[in-house]
Image: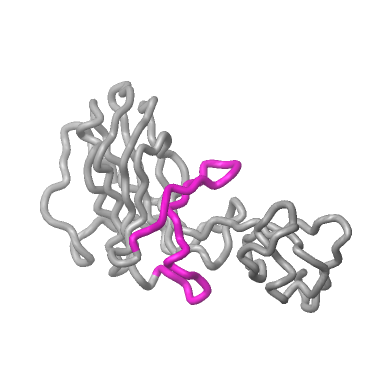
Amino acid sequence: LTITTSGNIAGSYDASHMIVCNGASNSGSLVVQSNNTTGLTRTYPIGSGTSYTHMTISSLSGTVTSPASISVNAVPTYYGAGGAISSDLNRYWNVVTTNLLGITADLSFTYVAGDVPGTGTESSYETSYYSGGNWSFNGAVNTGSHIASASSASGLSGVWTARKPATTYYSYQSGPWATSTTWTTDASGTLSVNPAVPGAGDNVVILNGRTVTAQDAGR
């Protein structure tokens, strides 16, 4: 659905009044065109099923080549690329900009409690952005209102979601993989700091002179 520079979206939005952009494999998007950044600074009232999971751009600056556009779609599953894992939020937003350069934006994404999988911990999530290469993180989500937000974002095009940033664990001593005291977050490996068993998506460094014994499949 494309809203041209002469069009508008009016009214109030909720789980019963929203734009559902499914298409083939959730490929449909809401596209808003404008001749200036003011017309793109708005709520994009999208969702799926009975979940109103909109994107809001509250502040936007940049250079516009008319007409500029922002396209967004909310996909009700976790993003399965870029090292993403199944404990990530079961919702991601595909955003594409055209004719818009030098972006600085404040934006937010609203999800529902049911988007947090049983293997995920919402309180550990941060707003996450991926456009290839490494993920970037923009602070903790609001677990009360289920909102992931970013301030002064320098890019919009890419995938936005919420996930736990990877922790890097180092071998503190030789021992079993599944024993927390085997691990530390101290890069030198000489201090026991935040001992815990590495989880899915975490990074592991086994330092010289230490042996870590894997006791189950997959490690």
Residue 36 x %, y %: 23, 27
First to last magenta residue range: 115-142
Residue name at image x 12 percent, y 48 percent: 10
Q: Position of residue 190 (x, y in %)?
A: 74, 58
Left or right: 203 with respect to 129?
right
Tell whether 125 sits left or right of 110: right
Q: Which of these two is toward me, 85 or 153?
A: 153
Q: Quadrant of residue 50?
A: bottom left
Q: Please tell me in which quadrant of the rendered image residue 92 appears.
A: bottom left
From this viewpoint, which residue is outermost toward the right? 209
Q: Which quadrant is the C terminus positioned in?
A: bottom right
The verdict on residue 203 being magenta is no
Residue situated in front as seen by the camera: 1 or 85: 85
Choose top left, top right, bottom left or bottom right for residue 21.
bottom left
**Left-right relation of 69 to 135:** left
Tell me which residue sits at (17%, 58%) in the image.
13
Residue 83 percent across, percent down from the top left: 61, 55
- Which of the two residues, 48 or 211, is positioned nearer the viewer here? 211
Choose between 192 and 210: the one closer to the eye: 192
